[in-house]
Image: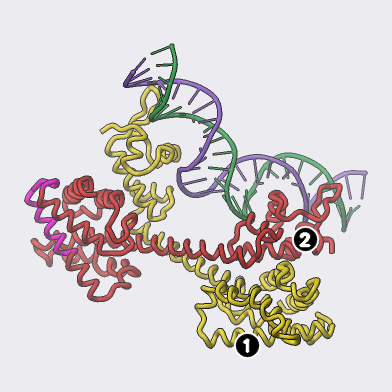
Chain colours: A yellow, B red, C purple, D green
Amino acid sequence: MDWSIQEIAKLAGTTSRTLRHYDDIGLLAPTRIGSNGYRHYDDAALVRLQRILLLRELGLGLPLIGEVLDREASAPHALRSHLEWLRGEQERLARQIASVEHTIGALEGGERLMAENMFDGFDHTRYKEEVEERWGKDAYAKSDAWWRSMSAEEKAAWQQRMSQLGRDWISAFERGIDPAGDEAQALAQRQFDWLRGIPGTPGGGGAGPSKEYFLGLAEMYVADERFGANYGGQAGAEFVRDAMTAYAEREL
Amino acid sequence: MDWSIQEIAKLAGTTSRTLRHYDDIGLLAPTRIGSNGYRHYDDAALVRLQRILLLRELGLGLPLIGEVLDREASAPHALRSHLEWLRGEQERLARQIASVEHTIGALEGGERLMAENMFDGFDHTRYKEEVEERWGKDAYAKSDAWWRSMSAEEKAAWQQRMSQLGRDWISAFERGIDPAGDEAQALAQRQFDWLRGIPGTPGGGGAGPSKEYFLGLAEMYVADERFGANYGGQAGAEFVRDAMTAYAEREL
DNA sequence: GGTAGAGGTTGACGCAGCGTCAATGTCAAG
DNA sequence: CTTGACATTGACGCTGCGTCAACCTCTACC
């Protein structure tokens, strides 16, 4: 019942580095240290190590494990507290997943919004292939998880609002109006409402996107050249950006 | 359009420390540095900062954000990859939550198992209050989330197996049999099966608890004095531990 | 011109839990 | 005596800054 550091590591299914770490932080000291400095462990140490590894596998921090094993806290009690923050973490992750899905939708929706309407006033058949190639079969497949999680009605409503908003943005841009003027600001308001329509907006909850998020998104439209590609020189995207920025500064 | 570090930090909703960090790692350099060393930022920098903060809020790492902004990667593409590992993390968390719930059940179930049966052969009314005080009303409420998530039948089955197993453990212990002998090993097998009955066992999945987990749990029974408290000197808990350990060494 | 106070600078530690060298000592076997 | 295998003690790296610390700089007021 006297093992070297490697032996006990293999017995418990961990590494010698971990054992030296546990020694360093005072979580598990070797039973005996030889005159040559070698660490030696007996079965009592193995027992303690196994308890440590069990609790660690459940996600407890090493200091907390120390308290539990040294009886300043009971295992079930510690685990229950731990459970609470695990649940909190999972919730946080769920919100973040919703945010990311939302943002992908907002970015690609914005792209498609601009693109699909761009060709509305022109020869639709002439550009059909190009549009399909860029945003067609593939794009629908790509928006997979988020998009598929919506019902048919939700999808229809989303696309409906998106298309109409896109047509109006393009019309406004082509008429060369002031992005800070009333009409463009009304469009920005609709853009805001469109975004608010999806749960999980960062920083805003049910109230809608936060100012920072809204501003960041506006800039992303300009940054992603695919968004404004069909306008030549990004001018369309920049118009949208300017209107959104002015809106954010005024309203958010 | 020329802001100090504090000003732009407030504008974007972050701190000056963060900005100096972004400068250090080359993510966002100040537009101009005065002869006194002071950092100055213009609106282009503000724009970039806003994009950074948006992506960071979604959980992307700073190096990845740099790639996205410097156009080596598109934002939707990066976000989709990110989404995948977010989902992976959430799954991992879900498994860990199941494990923790399971372990709480295994520990408290073990406690109750020993306690409730301990008094079975004695004057039940005499110790009733003590039992209730220790494991009664409170314990049931404490096992909240995990316990409540089970159906009535599952609960009944769980308690049924638990009680019977407990009675048999106690009987075996009182008869002073060998913990490594056939009868005790059959009990350990049942203990193993009982544990396997709950999904989310660490390291084992549907196959049952891993050797490490099983060993660790056995040790936790001894470590938590409440488990064996009613046996005087922990002898009962140690008997269970020894049988489980022998079983694990032999079968796992 | 002196001084206070607000704001700027560059280090450097801290956090969680080890993985991963690096430089070097020790022990058993051939 | 040499060769491995295994041991030791540092110390950096990773993530994203928060938080001192020690030390300039600029503005305002007396």
Magenta portion: prevailing SS class? helix
Amino acid found under the numbered disc labelled 1: Gln
The residue drawn where x is 73% and y is 55% is B28
At numbered mark 1, what does the secondary structure look like: helix, strand or loop?
Answer: helix
Res A212 quadrant in image: bottom right
Q: Is residue A246 above or below residue B252?
A: below
Front in this rendered view, residue D10 or A77 = D10
Q: CA distance from mark 2 to mark 1?
A: 36 Å
The image shows residue A48 at horizontal and vertical percentages of 32, 43
Res A123 quadrant in image: bottom right
CB contact under 8 Å: marks 2 and 1: no
The residue drawn where x is 55% and y is 68% is A96
Front in this rendered view, residue B38 or B32 = B32
Numbered mark located on residue A160 in the image: 1
- Between disc 2 and disc 1, the foreground one is 1
The image shows residue B21 at horizontal and vertical percentages of 69, 52
Magenta residue span: B162-181
The residue drawn where x is 40% and y is 42% is A27
Amino acid found under the numbered disc labelled 2: Ala
Co-location on one chain, circles 2 and 1: no
Q: Residues within 10 Å of mark 1 (few under 14, many from 20)?
A: few
At numbered mark 2, what does the secondary structure look like: helix, strand or loop?
Answer: helix
Res C2 quadrant in image: top right
Output the chain of dot 2. Answer: B
Front in this rendered view, residue A27 or B233 = A27
The image shows residue A179 at horizontal and vertical percentages of 81, 80
For disc 2, the marked residue is B45
